Amino acid sequence: MASASAAVRFLPNLPRPSRRRGIRCATERRALFGRIAPVYDDLNDLLSMGQHRVWKRMAVSWSGTKAGDTVLDLCCGSGDLAFLLSEKVGCTGKVIGLDFSKEQLSFASSKQYMKSNSCYKNIEWVEGDALDLPFPDCYFDAITIGYGMRNVVDKPKAMREMFRVVKPGSRASVLDFNKSTQPFVTSFQEWMIDNVVVPVASSYGLGKEYEYLKSSIDRFLTGCELEDLALESGFSEAKFYEIGGGLMGNLVTKR
Ligand SMILES: C[S@@+](CC[C@H](N)C(=O)[O-])C[C@H]1O[C@@H](n2cnc3c(N)ncnc32)[C@H](O)[C@@H]1O
């Protein structure tokens, strides 16, 4: 873990959206995730060749979730991380999966009914905004957010909300694409998006929706910047791990 003294590194001037632009942006993103919801899981499996399941297991493990915990999966989408968390906390624990897309949540909840494991009954799906969480302070034993931080319109606000609702001593685990500082990794990532991701998504009629990936990674934060953002938001420790050959990254923070 990086020490709190690392907080002296300065954050870049993150673009803070004006209120009106922020709302328009958030509405467009909610609509985008609603459109891709029906094929989201299939595309994740296809485009990552199943690797996203490994990265999600790592994110859950880094969150420090244990039996009996009450945990939050932010921007849960179709619920992969929430289901993994559910297995960890068991029948005595509780998982809340929160997302602002009704369509994603309805896929998550239909998957919950199809799965036979009775412990999945410990998951509750909540329609809500990561920037204004409907939970009291210091409520959760752990938080995960998979491929969500890159997509929220106000990243500092989302980080502050995560800090607010997690208990002192507990962790948040933030999995996403890595905005690499290595030119080779960035070029390879862009090549993959242009030549694999977008063409495959186009075959599902969703090419335009996935074109947005490249600019969202470009506007995202590097591992160091994510560590700084976490420390500036109040977390006492923050450490970023590159995974998937540097294409993905996972920030682990402790309140
Ligand atoms: C790329 S998906 C990730 C889904 C899932 N966590 C996974 O790893 O497969 C990003 C999700 O973030 C959600 N999202 C984006 N901004 C949000 C916000 N402000 N509040 C709640 N959900 C948000 C979207 O609706 C979408 O389901």
Image (cartoon, rainbow, N blue to C red):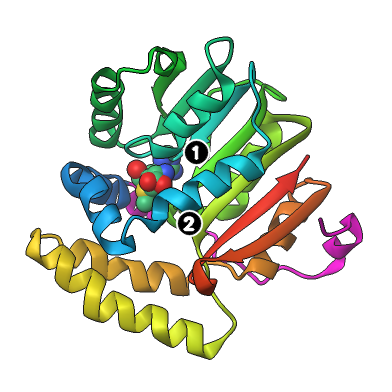
Q: Quadrant of residue 119?
A: top left
38 or 138: nearer the viewer: 38
Q: Is mark 1 within 8 Å of ligand 1?
A: yes
Seen at 79% across and 45% down, the residue is 234
Q: Which residue occupies the foreground of this view, 66 or 37?
A: 66
Quadrant for ligand 1?
top left
Q: Which mark is residue 130?
A: 1
Disc 1 residue type? Answer: Ala
Q: Please provide the residue range marked out in magenta.
A: 1-26
Q: Is residue 140 in view?
A: yes
Provide residue 210's location: percent of width, then percent of height.
25, 64
- Could you tell whether 177 is left or right of 26 in the image? right
The residue tagged with tag 2: helix, strand or loop? Answer: loop
| Viewer can see residue 19 | no
Mark closest to the chain's N terminus, 1 or 2? 2
Q: Which mark is residue 18?
A: 2
Would you place residue 64 above or below residue 200 in this image? above
Front residue of this view, candidates 234 and 188: 188
- Marks counted in the figure total 2
Find residue 126 and report its image quarter: top left
Identify the residue at the far right of this view.
5
Residue 26, image x and y in percent? 36, 48
Question: Where is the C terminus found, in terms of image quarters?
Answer: top right
**Figure check: 49 above or below 69:** below
Q: CA distance from mark 1 to mark 2?
A: 17 Å
Residue 20 falls within the magenta-colored stretch: yes
Q: How many residues crowd mark 1 within 10 Å: few (<14), some (14–19), many (20+)?
A: many
Horizontally, is 2 left or right of 244 in the view? right
